[in-house]
Image (cartoon, rainbow, N blue to C red):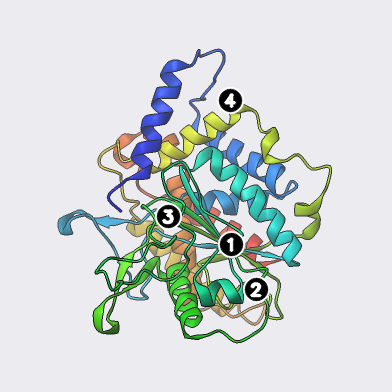
Amino acid sequence: NILDLDDMVAHEVMQIQQASEPQTVNMGGDGDTCRQLAIDTFARHIFGGDKIAGEALLMAFMSLAERNERYGSKAIQMPTGATLGCGSLNFVLPDHQSCALLQTELGAIMKLIAPVAAHIQLSLSALDAGGNENAPVDVTLDCDCNIITSPEKTAANRLEPSVLQLPKSSCIVINEGALSEGTLKQRGQRTLAALSKMTMTHSIPYRFDGLMEIDFEADLRIIVLSCNNSSGRGSKLLPCSMSVKVASQNCLALDAPRVDTIPGDTILRILRYIVTCRSNNTTDRQSISLPKDLLDRAQEDFINRRKNNGSSMSRDIEEHDLHRWLLLTRLQARSRFGERLSTNRETSSMAKIGDWENALSLDDAMQAR
């Protein structure tokens, strides 16, 4: 995690902007307009017009660990074990063909806006052997490792290379859709457990001498693709912070525009927008703070929703729901960071009541499917 990919992308975008004629490449200055442009573009070119899925993808791109500057910029761990500010996303699809197609389109968009993106194709044999021959890593750096096992010390006193050893801010897409029923060997079980811990807590266990395991942070943007199950609540093997169902017609429409048809100036505007929201070139990467009035409102809404469990709500509201809503609030606020930075630098990193309301609205829409 020595390399900071957000800084690298910010530098590249600045060079592109300086080398481009303003009338040819319009980066756009309105953060809210660029935010909606990103959602609309993702929806139209990846999800067949599904704006809920498009906004969910944007939230995944906003995932970024909040850090404690007093302890060497260490990522903040919550009592639940999750990393504050990080959220993994599970797209739930009808079948493995839909998972494969969505993985292709996500891979295409990440080549345009993410410097490092790893794609993992899960299967019983890949988990047991630690290999991933059908879906190598796509990166702009010198990296072609396709081993998906948890990092482990070798007899030569070196860590075995693994696709899970990624720089912070990298993207990783795990296609669980092709995983069939069967029995995993010990190595496969250990790899699956490591992936599960990564999707739940954004940390990865490294194995050293004496079978000792030490967790290291994994400040990654994580997306899991899985097939619909009986519970309808997403992947059971790789639980994620957020999940949303995507209809097959939204991914399989043959006449739908694909990622390769997105105009170049649109890609550059989206790229600059995401860089601005994630950049640490402004007051040392502002952490998103939740003011007291927002937390009071969150407590009030949580209590009211728990009271309404048996009436308007179709499911029980539990503590993990509140954690997810607060996470979405941080992601919503970060997605508007650039817009607020241009109007009021001092309060740009402070979440608003509107972010909480937008988080609830998006979560309700995702949960209703």
Mark 1 and 3 residues: CB-CB less than 8 Å, in contact?
no
Instruction: Identify which amino acid the numbered label 2 is placed on.
Output: Leu
Q: What residue type is labelled 4?
A: Asp
Residue that carries the numbered disc 2 in the rendered image: 179
Image-quadrant location for residue 73: bottom left
Figure check: 303 above or below 18:
below
Q: Which residue matches tag 1?
A: 363
Disc 1, SS:
helix
Q: Quadrant of the N terminus?
A: bottom left
Given contact means CB atoms under 8 Å apart, are the residues at marks 2 and 4 in contact? Answer: no
Label 2: how many Cα within 10 Å (few below 14, some 14–19, many 20+)? some
| Amino acid type of the residue that numbered disc 1 sits on in the rendered structure | Asp
* Residue with the most extreme left position: 70
The numbered dot on residue 141 is none
Q: Say which of marks 2 and 4 sits in front.
A: 2
From the top left corner, tell me how far across and down residue 211 is, in percent: 30, 83
Say whether disc 1 or disc 2 marks the residue closer to the N-terminus.
Answer: 2
**Where is 232 relative to 170, above or below?**
below
Question: Which secondary structure lies at badge 3?
Answer: helix
Q: How crowded is mark 1: few (under 14 residues within 10 Å), some or many (20 or more)?
A: many
Res 246 visible: no
Q: Do the residues labelled 4 and 1 touch (CB within 8 Å)?
A: no
Q: Could you tell me which quadrant the C terminus lies in?
A: bottom right
Type of amino acid under label 3? Arg
Name which of mark 2 and mark 4 comes first in the sequence: 2
Q: Where is residue 135 in the image (x, y as percent from the top left)?
A: 59, 57
Residue position marked by numbered label 4 in the rendering:
265
273 or 112: nearer the viewer: 112
**Which badge, 3 or 2, is on the more N-terminal residue?**
2
Q: Which residue is drawn at 51% across and 72% down?
A: 321
Task: Give the Cα distance between marks 4 and 1.
Answer: 31 Å
Residue 54 vs residue 347, the one in the foreground: 54
